[in-house]
Image (cartoon, grey):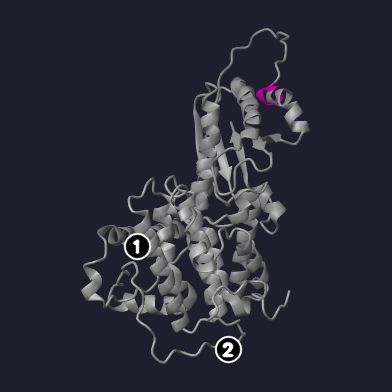
Amino acid sequence: MNQDDPFANFEDDDKTVLKPSPGRQRKPQASPTPPPESLPPVTPPEGGVQQQLQLQSDTNPLLGSALPILALVMPLRNSASHHDIGGLRNAVINEIKAFDQQARGKGCAAAQVQTARYLLCSLVDEVVLNTPWGGNSIWATQGMLITFHKESWGGEKFFQVLDNVIGQPGIYLDLLEVFYYCLSLGFEGKYRVLQRGSDRLQEVRENLYRVIQRQKGDFDRELSLQWRGITDKRNVLAKYVPLWVIGLATAAFLMLLFLGFLYSINQTSGPLMGQLYQIKDAIKAPAPAPMVVEQKPLEVAVVEPTVLEKIRSFLQPEIEQKKVAVLDQDGQTMIRILAKSFFASGSDNIRDRHLPLLNRIAQALEVVKTPITVVGHTDNVPIFTARFPSNWDLSRARAQAVADVLRKHQLKHVIAEGRADTQSLVPNDTAAHRALNRRVEINF
């Protein structure tokens, strides 16, 4: 591979696009053509907030130009049906054309604009074709990749190009951020069908995050709300924009605004939650008052095994297979689940192959008469999705999933707690260590 031209194996499907030359700027056009009709943009607030949005959007012109397309992904992914797929296709085509023209007008390298367009087409196609209504629609034969790049699937080339540019973040940082947000919005490509695809894709995403973070310092892992819309001066054409397009754009903007507030709240509340749990764990129950016991003749009694001994005996096969560990922690018994990949990456769904192990643990707990607490733990890699705004939410949901299985075995007084990454077993400095810290513990 030519390190000076990482797009060398990227087929030039647009003959007007030139290969990138690091350090060169694209010359502005003398008289740009009018922008194509597209989805109506959202006008930002006025005053000081608008100035902040201007500063943020100028940091990555390639990503700023792509935000209207990225904003469509979430509502499309969650839609159960669509009444005008042809109209949607035309609107997305117009948005992609507008992205291409706007990014080039901002001076982005032509090859990077072409590549970013390929990424956006791949993302939109995958989202639409995996909806209940998209697979049997016109999109299956006339998707964005076919329309703009004469290809039917980008799940392989997406990651080939990523491998080509990730080694040069100083040159391709803006493009790498577009890669990252496509993955954050759920693009899977070839990993959708590969064995351990979700785990391997998570590793790709984490590595990309670390590369970007090293290049630019503190970096928001999710889509930022600080973007600047384009003032729509086409008042004559405004009345021809379909109402569903306006509603879709408004819903996407409100969703991004909500996620931004949610992310801000979780960033503030996370440390406070950790302190509260430290206080809770430090509080010990008061010692019972001494009791006066009437002296009776000494009797020889048969010593019954303790609850800890009974559970260790029952789970001995699983202990030997290193699937669980049964520990005595300050007078409390703990069952630590050691099975690898117990949950799907970024999910609270217990993998089917681990359900027999969890059923065995539930049978072992039938001898327990005290309340049972299921505690979920994560590593220190942040998560921010609509379902899991933080690691606190993910760890609590995983603990709740285990608790639900235990309750099916008639176990009562089972509660679930999440501790995020506040009680790590080992430093989160390697993938193996992070895997050890992602665990569920059962205390009683």
Q: Mark 2 points at which residue?
A: 24
Q: Mark 1 points at which residue?
A: 253
Image quarter where the C terminus lies is top right
Q: Nearer the viewer, residue 19 or 321?
A: 19
Q: In the image, what residue type sits under mark 1? A: Phe
Q: Is the magenta stretch mostly helix, strand or loop?
A: helix
Q: Position of residue 299 (x, y in %)?
A: 71, 8
Question: Residue 118 vs residue 210: left or right?
Answer: left
* Relative vertical location of residue 439 with respect to residue 163 in this rendering, above or below: above
Question: Residue 186 vs residue 34: left or right?
Answer: right
* Relative vertical location of residue 4 with respect to residue 147 in this rendering, above or below: below
* Relative vertical location of residue 139 with respect to residue 412 in this rendering, above or below: below
Stretch of the chain drawn in magenta: 306-310
Q: Going 53% across and 81% down the picture, which residue do you hit?
A: 16
Q: Which of 266 and 297 is in front in this view?
A: 266
Q: Is residue 209 within the magenta segment? A: no
Kindly tell me whether residue 97 is visible in this rendering. yes
Q: Position of residue 258 (x, y in %)?
A: 36, 58
